[in-house]
Amino acid sequence: MTIPIAPQEEVANFTHEFSGWSIENGKLHREFIFANFVDAFGFMTKAAILAEKANHHPEWFNVYKKVVVDLTTHEAGGITERDFALAKQMERIASN
């Protein structure tokens, strides 16, 4: 099954609606800052569970209270609806 790459207009609309997200090196990019390491790691744990269920895994890393996320759909070669969906879930987790 081929996964379609999102049109540039859709990507632009997403980054406009979710202003914390940007495009870096062809990927959706976001840096989350939390109060401390435990909160950052808790975010990653919750997001990892959702990512595993969706079989769509982020490129990310954590340093103390910062989590840096890059999303792309490797098999499609770009940003797809899968990336938007996971980014929205991450936004929801981070806001709780």
Image: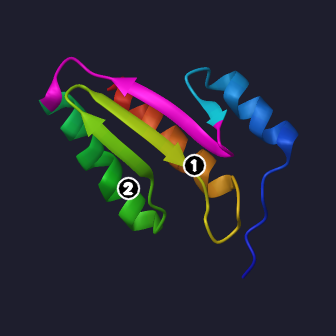
Give, as a three-letter code, the residue at label 2: Leu
Identify which residue is drawn at 76% across, 39% down. 11
- The residue shown at (36%, 29%) is 94
Residue at position x 45%, y 40% from top? 69
11 part of magenta stretch: no
Q: Give the amino acid at mark 1.
A: Ala
In the rendering, at what x and y percent does residue 81 appear? 68, 54
* Residue count near mark 2 (Cα–Cα under 10 Å), binned few <14, some 14–19, many ≥20: some
Q: Is residue 27 above or below residue 58?
A: above
Badge 1: how crowded within 10 Å, few (<14), some, or many (20+)? Answer: some
Q: Position of 55 compared to 84: left or right? A: left
Residue 62 bears which disc, if any?
none
Q: Residue reaching furthest front?
A: 25
* Lower position in the chain sequence, tag 2 or tag 1: 2
Question: In the image, residue 90 lies at what x, y percent?
Answer: 43, 39
Quadrant of residue 95 within the rendered picture? top left
| Residue under numbered circle 2 | 50
For the point 16% across and 22% down, the residue is 36
Which residue corresponds to mark 1? 85
Q: Is residue 82 above or below residue 29?
A: below
Disc 1, SS: helix
- Tag 2 near tag 1, CB within 8 Å: no
Q: Position of residue 13 (x, y in %)?
A: 78, 31
CA distance for labels 2 and 1: 10 Å
The quarter of the picture where the N terminus appears is bottom right
Q: Quadrant of the C terminus?
A: top left
Magenta residue span: 24-37
Residue 27 colored magenta? yes
Q: 57 or 26, which is in the foreground? A: 26
Q: Quadrant of residue 28?
A: top right
Left or right? Give the position of 19 relative to 45.
Answer: right
Helix, strand or loop at mark 2: helix
